Image: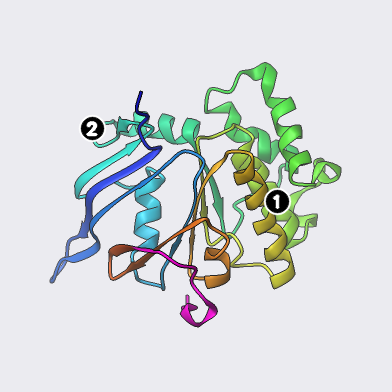
Amino acid sequence: MTHAPLIELHNVTRSFPGDPEVQALKSVSCSVEKGEYVSVVGHSGSGKSTMLNILGLLDRPTVGEYRIDGQLTGALSESERAALRASRIGFVFQSFHLLPRRSVLNNVLMPMMYNGTPRAERQDRAVEALERVGLAHRMNFLPGTLSGGEKQRAAIARAVASRPSLLLADEPTGALDIATADSIMDLFDEFNANGQTIIVITHSAEVAARGRRTLQISDGRLTELNQLITTDLEMAA
């Protein structure tokens, strides 16, 4: 029996009205299998943020099809898209997006209140996720007392606690120093080794090189790089 890829984009174009019209994505087609670790690298304005928004069900293609786990998303209502996003996709952002007045544990718990995770499982899943990222000793602290690396670890725990099909990371090391960034990317390696599907959107050649497969986006067009990118491909954000 043939299994559908986890992610499928087929001739996806995203246009924004104007004079002239701007095509942020141009006939993008690609697929990502379950368990893959894919980097999407591109400079500022290349279309990678638009691609992230499409993949994360935060925006819709102007034309083309997007399927996640075989499900066609184009005809879904906004509430259906929100439910699918909450149950299937974990997000990690550059700026963490932690709620400052809630403990680290409560930050990890909150998404599970809305994505169908059984109430009886939420606490255990949150604690387990914090243990996986090495932050169990900080679970009762407020985010403002954490270092940048600890904040990103908390954000990663929040993203994986509900056991999403896809972990989608947007410049996950952009606000971190080199040593801390390496430790965060080590976590992604560990998650992928355990079967987690990961897509990282980045402008950094070093971060992109952590992926097992690299896609490059330039002027809205996506191409696959068949060999490891090197530091001379580093692009300014």
Q: Is residue 43 left or right of residue 28?
A: right
> Disc 1 marks which residue?
153
> Disc 2 marks which residue?
75
Q: Hey, which quadrant is residue 119 in on the image?
A: top right
The number of numbered discs placed on residues in the rendered structure image is 2
Q: Depth check: 5 or 155 in front? A: 5
- Relative image position of residue 52 (x, y in whole percent): 40, 54
Determine the secondary structure under disc 1: helix
Residue at 59% in and 29% down: 112
Sequence order check, earlier mark of 2 and 1: 2
The rendered magenta stretch, by its main secondary structure, is classed as loop
Q: Is residue 233 magenta?
A: yes
* Up/down of 135 relative to 202, above or below: above
Classify mark 1: residues with Cα within 10 Å, few (<14), some (14-19) or many (20+).
many
User: Considering the image in quadrants, where does the N terminus appear?
Assistant: top left
- Relative image position of residue 224 (x, y in whole percent): 36, 62
Name the outermost residue toward the right.
137
Q: Is residue 197 magenta?
A: no
Type of the residue with mark 1: Arg
Q: Is residue 4 left or right of residue 170?
A: left
* Magenta region, residue range: 224-237
Q: Is residue 199 left or right of residue 127?
A: left
Type of the residue with mark 2: Ala
